[in-house]
C-alpha cells in the first residue's frame, strides 16, 4: 500500500476527473431521459407522511462542498486512488441506471416563504434533474465521503452528524423517494466491495 501523502496536483487531478465525469454522465442522463414520453415513479405508501422541511435544503446543498473537499483530505496515495475509483464507479453505474431505469420524483413540493431558501430551491429546479433519482448519488456519495472523513482526528463526530442530516434531507427537501435512498446505499457498498481500501476491509 502506498502510504505517501498525495500531492496537491494529484488531489486536484482526482477532483477534476471525478467532477468532469459526474457533470458529463449526470447531464447526459438527464437530457436522454427528458426525451422519454413517460417516466414512471416508485413510492412507498408511508412517504406521504414525510414532512417537507425547507431548511433541510442547507445540508442537502452541502453535498457539493463535501465533493470538493474530500479529495484534499486523503492522507495517503492509496486512499486517494481508492476514493477516486469508488467515485467514478458510483457515478458511471448510477448514470447507467438513470438511463435504463429512469424514475421521477412524484410528490408536489410546497412553496417556500423564505427568500434565501427559495433561491436555493430555484437553483435546484434549474440544475438538479427530476429524473436522475435512483440510485441517489447524494446518498452514495455521502457514504463514500464518510470512509475518508471517519479517519480524521478533528470534527469527525460533527461531520458524521452532518452527513446523516444530508442523507435525511434527500427526503425532507422532496428531492428523492425512499427507493432512491435504498439503491444509493446498495451502490455505495458495492463500490466498497469492488474497490476495498485494505484487504478484507470493504470500507
Image (cartoon, grey):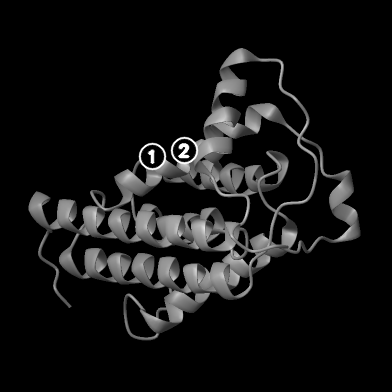
Packing grade of label 1 (10 A; few <14, some 14-19, many >=20) is: few
Q: Would residue 28 appear left or right of 106 to someone viewing this image?
A: left
Quadrant in the rendering for residue 109? top right
Q: Position of residue 182 (x, y in %)?
A: 67, 66
| Picture layout, residue 159 above or below residue 147 | above
Q: Specify the quadrant that holds the C terminus.
A: bottom left
Q: Specify the quadrant that holds the N terminus.
A: bottom left
In the picture of the structure, the residue carrying the numbered disc 1 is 65
Q: Would residue 78 appear left or right of 181 to someone viewing this image?
A: left
Q: As rendered, which of 108 and 162 lies closer to the eye?
A: 108
Q: As rendered, which of 126 and 150 lies closer to the eye?
A: 126
**CB under 8 Å between discs 2 and 1:** yes
Residue 5's mark? none
| Picture layout, residue 69 above or below residue 89 | above
Q: Which residue is located at x 42 percent, y 65 percent?
A: 91
Quadrant in the rendering for residue 195? bottom left
| Picture layout, residue 97 above or below residue 194 | above
Q: Which residue is located at x 84 percent, y 52 percent?
A: 47
**What kind of element bears circle 1?**
helix
Q: As rendered, which of 126 and 86 lies closer to the eye?
A: 126
Q: Position of residue 190 (x, y in %)?
A: 50, 78
| Picture layout, residue 52 above or below residue 102 | above
Q: Would residue 186 appear left or right of 190 to someone viewing this image?
A: right
**What kind of element bears circle 2?**
loop
Q: Marks 2 and 1, how far apart in space?
A: 5 Å
Q: Position of residue 76 (x, y in %)?
A: 18, 62
Residue 74 at least partly seen: no
Q: Which residue is located at x 52 percent, y 63 percent?
A: 32
In the picture of the structure, the residue carrying the numbered disc 2 is 62
Amino acid at each position: 500500500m502506498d502510504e505517501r501523502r498525495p500531492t496537491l496536483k494529484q488531489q486536484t487531478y482526482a477532483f477534476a476527473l471525478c467532477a468532469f465525469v459526474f457533470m458529463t454522465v449526470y447531464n447526459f442522463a438527464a437530457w436522454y431521459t427528458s426525451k422519454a414520453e413517460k417516466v414512471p415513479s416508485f413510492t412507498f405508501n408511508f412517504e406521504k407522511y414525510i414532512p417537507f422541511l425547507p431548511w433541510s435544503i442547507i445540508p442537502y446543498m452541502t453535498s457539493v462542498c463535501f465533493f470538493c473537499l474530500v479529495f484534499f483530505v486523503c492522507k495517503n496515495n492509496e486512499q486517494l486512488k481508492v476514493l477516486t475509483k469508488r467515485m467514478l464507479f458510483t457515478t458511471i453505474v448510477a448514470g447507467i441506471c438513470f438511463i435504463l431505469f429512469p424514475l421521477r420524483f412524484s410528490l408536489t413540493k410546497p412553496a417556500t416563504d423564505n427568500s434565501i431558501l427559495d433561491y436555493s430551491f430555484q437553483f435546484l429546479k434549474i440544475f438538479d434533474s427530476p429524473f436522475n433519482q435512483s440510485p441517489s448519488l447524494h446518498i452514495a456519495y455521502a457514504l463514500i465521503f464518510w470512509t475518508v472523513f471517519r479517519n480524521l482526528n478533528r470534527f469527525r463526530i460533527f461531520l458524521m452528524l452532518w452527513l446523516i442530516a444530508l442523507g435525511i434531507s434527500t427526503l425532507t427537501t422532496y428531492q428523492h423517494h425512499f427507493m432512491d435512498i435504498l439503491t444509493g446505499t446498495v451502490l455505495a457498498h458495492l463500490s466498497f466491495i469492488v474497490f476495498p481500501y485494505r484487504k478484507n476491509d470493504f470500507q
